[in-house]
Image (spheres, coloured by chain):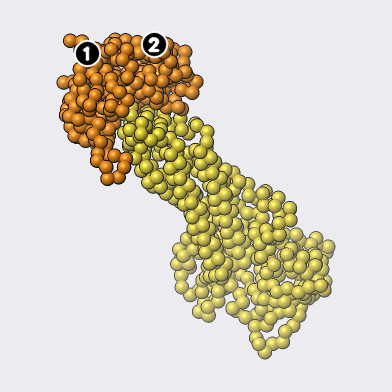
Chain colours: A orange, B yellow
Amino acid sequence: MHPIELVSITKRFKAAEKGSDEITILQDLNLNIIQGRSTAIIGKSGSGKSTLLHIAGGLDSPSEGHVICSGIDFATLDDRKRSELRNRHIGFIFQANLLLEDFTAMENVMAPALISGVKARDCRDRAVELLEKLGLADRMSHVPGQLSGGEKQRVAICRALMNRPEVILADEPTGALDEENASEVENLLLDLVREERRSLLLVTHNQDFAFKCDDVYLLKNRNLSLEKSAE
Amino acid sequence: MNPFVIHWSRKRILRKGRLTSCLILIALVMAPLVCALIFSDSMMEGITSKYIYLSDGHLQLNYSGSRELSDFDSDLYGSMLYSCDEVTSGYALMYSATGTTNVMVKGVGENYFNDRRMEQVTINIAEQTGESTSNIKGIMLSRATADELKVEIGDRVALMIVPDDVDKVLRPVLCRIDGIFYSGYDQLDSLLCFVDLDYAKTLYGAPESTCLELLVNSEYMEKLDDVIAALGSGYDVSKWDQHNVSVYENFVTSRQMILIILLLVVVVAAFYTASVAQQMIQDDMQDIAITKLIGASDTLVRRSAFLSVYTVTFVGMILGILLGLLIGLNLGPILTWLSSMGLKSLSFYLLDFDITVPWLSILLISACLLVISYVSIQISLGKTRRITPIRLFTEL
C-alpha cells in the first residue's frame, strides 16, 4: 500500500469565458508515492504541478479518477474524515509558509497534533525536538511576524512533520527564499524526510532541488514522464 | 473538548480588538438592564409597602351587615396575623390660611403605629407642655401636606368634612397639628392624615367608614388567600390591591413592560454577538483555511469560533450583572445624590427603600441572551463551510 496513489486522474477547469470549452489540465494521470522515497515533479509554470499536488493532498477533487491515501479513497470521505486523514497522513509545505499569525513558532508546530486531539503537554517535546533540529531553539516563542522568511519556512517544515505523516507534499517550498536560505532549507527538508523515513512529493521548477530527490517526473502535455529514478 | 479548539479560542479572546469591544458592549448593556430591574422591582416593592402599612393593611375586614366587626377575635389567628387595628376613614377638604388640599382622614388607635409601620415612616410629634384644656383635636399630617399648606407643628388647620348623609350640612372643624409624618413617598403622603380613632368616629359615623386593618406575619405575605380562607365567612374581606386597583395594575403593567423592553434590548445585544462572530470569520478567513489545510474539520473550526464569541458573551454578561448589582445595591445613595442635585422628577419615587434583587428576572434576561446568542452565532458560523483550503491558493 502506497501513502498516496493517483489513479487515472483527469482535471478539467471551466474556461473563464462563457460558452468556451473546458480546459483539461491533467489527463488520465497515474502516480504512486512510494513509502520512504522522495519524488519531485517538475514542469513549466501553468503545467498543472500545483493542481496535481492539491489533488494528491485532497484539497481539490479530480474531475475523473481516484486519489487513494493510505488505502482510502478521498472521494468516499466526508469533511470530517477527509480532514482527519489529511491531519494524520499528510504534511504540507507551501511557498507561502501559511503559518497562523497569532501563534508562536512552537504553537504553529504543535497545531496539527492539537487538532488530532493530543494535549499540549504531550506534544511539546516533539515540537521542541523538531524546532531544535532546524535551528530554531531560540525562536520558539516568536510569532511569524518576528521571524525571517527562512525561519518561517523551517517552522512550516517542522509543522508538516509534527504528526509523523506518511507523506509530505511540498509546493515550491524554497520559492520565496534567497539562494542561501533556499539551499539550506532544501537540505534540511530532504535530510529530515530521510531521517524520519517519510515520503516526499515535491513540486518545483527548481531542477537542482528536484534532482536531489529519488525520483523525478516531468509534467508535460497533461501527463507525467519519468526523468530520473533511484531504482 | 479538542485542545486546539480551546487553544485557538483563547488566542482569539486575548487578541485585543473586536472581541474585547463585544465583551465591553455586552457588559454595558447588561449592567443598566440589571440596574433597571433592581430599581423598578425595589421601587414597586417599596411603594407597595407604603400602601400596605400606612393606607390599607394587607387585608381589610369591612362591615358587611352580617357580622359585627367587634366580634372579630384576632387572637384566633395568632400565627397568621401580626396586628389588627380598627380604623375609621373618610375624605375631607383641609385648608390653612394659605392653602387648600384634599385628604383622607384616617382615625387610628394609639397602638396603630407598631414596629413594622414605624419602619415605613418618620414621625415628628409636638412636645407635650402639660394637659391641654382646649377642645381642639390633634391631627397628624404629612410633610408634603404641611409644605403645601405652609403649616408646621402647633399650627391649626380646618377640615371640611364631607358628610355621609346628603341631608347634613357641610361643617368645618378646627384641628391642631400635633405631628408631621414622612414616609418617603410623597404621592401617598399628600393624601393621608391621621386623627384619633374616637374622634374620627364622631366625624364619620356610618358603619361603612370603619374597618379592621390586618397585617399578616411575613410568612403569609404571599399567601393572603390562605389567610382569607382561614378567616371564614361572615366578613367582607379585601386585599390591599383591591383597594388600590389602579396602583396595583400600574405596577403589574409597568413590570411587564419593563421586562419586555429589557428582553428586546437583550435580543438586539444577542444579535450583535452574531454579527461579531460573522466579522470574526471574515477577518480570520486565512487562518481558518490554514487550519483546515493542516487537518481541522469544519466542525472543529466552528466550535473554536463559537467558543471564542460565546465565552466573551458569557463573561461580558457576568461582568454586566456584577456591575448592575453593584450600582443597584447602591441605588439609595445614588438617588439621594441625584435628588440633592435638584432632579424634580424623583419626587414621584421613593428615595429610601429596601433593595430587592429580582433574581428570576435577571435569570430570565440572562438566559434569553445566552439562548439567542447561541442560536444566532451558530447560524452566522455556517459561513465557515465555504472556506476551504484551496481558497488559500485561488482567492485569499
- The answer to whether residue B273 is visible is yes
Q: Quadrant of the C terminus of chain B?
A: top left
- Which residue in the structure is indicated by mark 2? A184
Residue A76: x and y in percent read: 19, 34
Q: In this view, does B330 lie to the left or right of B237?
A: right
Image quadrant assignment for residue A27: top left
Q: Nearer the viewer, mark 2 or mark 1?
A: 1
Question: Which residue shows up at 30% across the image and 45% down it?
Answer: A18
Mark 1 residue element: strand
Residue A59: x and y in percent read: 29, 31
**Chain to which mark 2 belongs:** A
Q: Which mark is drawn over residue A228? A: 1
How crowded pointer 1 is (Cα within 10 Å; few <14, some 14-19, many 20+) is rated as some
Residue A155: x and y in percent read: 40, 18
Q: Is residue B210 left or right of residue A40?
A: right
Residue B308: x and y in percent read: 44, 36
- The answer to whether residue A74 is visible is no
The three-letter code of the residue at mark 2 reads Glu
Question: Which residue shows up at 66% across the image and 55% down it?
Answer: B351
In this rendered view, identify the residue nearer to me: B125 or B341: B341
Q: How many marks?
A: 2
Mark 2 residue element: helix
The answer to whether marks 2 and 1 sit on the same chain is: yes
Question: Which residue shows up at 59% across the image and 44% down it?
Answer: B326
Image quadrant assignment for residue B45: bottom right
- Counting residues from the start of the chain, the first of labels 2 and 1 encountered is 2
Q: How far apart are marks 2 and 1 (CA)?
A: 23 Å
Asked if B310 appears above or below B39 in the picture, the reply is above
Question: Which residue shows up at 37% across the image and 25% down it?
Answer: A111
In this rendered view, identify the residue nearer to me: A100 or B31: A100
The three-letter code of the residue at mark 1 reads Lys
